[in-house]
Image (tube, rainbow, N blue to C red):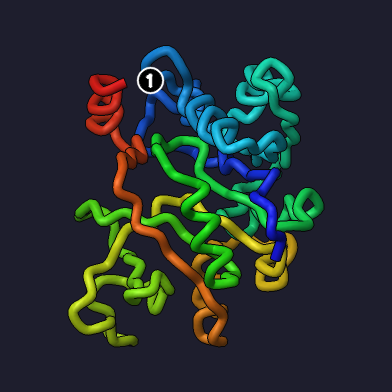
């Protein structure tokens, strides 16, 4: 594990944004404006705040618009590279395609969320547990999120499961938390992800890693977290920002 704070990040920006159609038929979700900036620019600001200067962005739906707006990143004080997907690869498949860019600890997050994450605190937990991956989770109640993350008292993930699953018991007395999509990862994660395969990082990497006894950690986020997944949420954050 790299003892230095990550210098690189991956922004996931390939999604279709189906719940925001017809808006996203002509505008990729990461370029939707909230206040004076697009969603993806808020995330670039977050990364810059913690000294991250290199970013890889995966592209699929209307990706040319994202590339045209951000370019090589120079105007944002970043070095930006692009991983272009011929089909939508999912969180695991999209990350695997960008493997060449990452040889040390790195950050990954969604390009279309708004979050005031403390990446330093997340990294400190990641280091303390020598974790394969450390996820930022939220205690906010959401009926539309079925899969929850369960932590022990020391911040280790003990389960990632559907609500009331029939196949595996949940920790007694524990309340599941929502995964925000922001995580710190070790390059070892790539060994779990098959090349040229559409997959979820949770199903293909995190669940098998937990089953093997690998350490995954989770930090509960006390601040705001908006995934802007519907028109109601979009209007809500536009009133805030």
The relative height of residue 131 versus residue 45 in the rendered view (above or below) is below
- Most distant residue in the top direction: 36
Instruction: Indicate the quadrant where residue 177 lies.
Output: bottom left
- Per the image, label 1 sits on a secondary structure element best described as strand
Q: Which residue is mark 1?
A: 34
Percent position of residue 22, x then y: 38, 25
Residue at figure coordinates x 34%, y 51% from the top left: 221
Residue at figure coordinates x 38%, y 20% from the top left: 34
* Left or right of 151 on screen, residue 6: right
Residue at figure coordinates x 34%, y 57% from the top left: 220
* Left or right of 9 on screen, residue 176: left
- Most distant residue in the right direction: 100
> Which quadrant does the C terminus fall into?
top left
Q: Badge 1 local density, few (<14 within 10 Å), some, or many (20+)?
A: some
* Left or right of 6 on screen, residue 230: left
Residue at figure coordinates x 27%, y 29% from the top left: 231
- Is residue 116 among the parts visible in the rendering? yes
- Is residue 28 among the parts visible in the rendering? no
* Left or right of 145 on screen, residue 185: right
Q: Nearer the viewer, residue 21 or 38?
A: 38
The relative height of residue 89 versus residue 54 in the rendered view (above or below) is below
Percent position of residue 50, x then y: 57, 38
The relative height of residue 106 versus residue 67 in the rendered view (above or below) is below
Percent position of residue 215, x then y: 53, 77
């Amino acid at each position: 594990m790299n003892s230095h704070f990550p210098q690189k990040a991956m922004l996931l920006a390939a999604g279709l944004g189906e719940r925001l159609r017809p808006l996203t038929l002509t505008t990729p979700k990461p370029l939707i404006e909230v206040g004076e900036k697009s969603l993806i620019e808020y995330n670039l600001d977050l990364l810059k705040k913690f000294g991250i200067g290199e970013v890889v962005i995966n592209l699929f739906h209307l990706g040319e618009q994202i590339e045209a707006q951000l370019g090589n990143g120079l105007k944002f004080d970043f070095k930006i590279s692009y991983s272009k997907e011929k089909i939508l690869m999912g969180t695991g498949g999209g990350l695997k395609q960008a493997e060449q860019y990452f040889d040390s600890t790195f950050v990954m997050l969604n390009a279309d969320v708004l979050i005031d994450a403390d990446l330093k605190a997340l990294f400190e937990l990641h280091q303390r547990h020598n974790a394969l991956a450390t996820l930022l989770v939220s205690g906010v109640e959401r009926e539309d999120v079925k899969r929850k993350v369960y932590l022990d008292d020391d911040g280790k993930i003990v389960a990632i499961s559907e609500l009331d699953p029939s196949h595996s018991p949940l920790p007694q007395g524990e309340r599941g938390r929502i995964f925000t999509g922001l995580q710190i990862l070790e390059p070892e994660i790539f060994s779990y992800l098959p090349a040229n395969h559409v997959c979820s990082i949770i199903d293909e990497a995190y669940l098998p890693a937990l089953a093997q006894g690998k350490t995954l950690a989770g930090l509960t986020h006390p601040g705001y977290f908006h995934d802007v997944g519907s028109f109601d949420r979009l209007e809500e954050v536009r009133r805030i920002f």
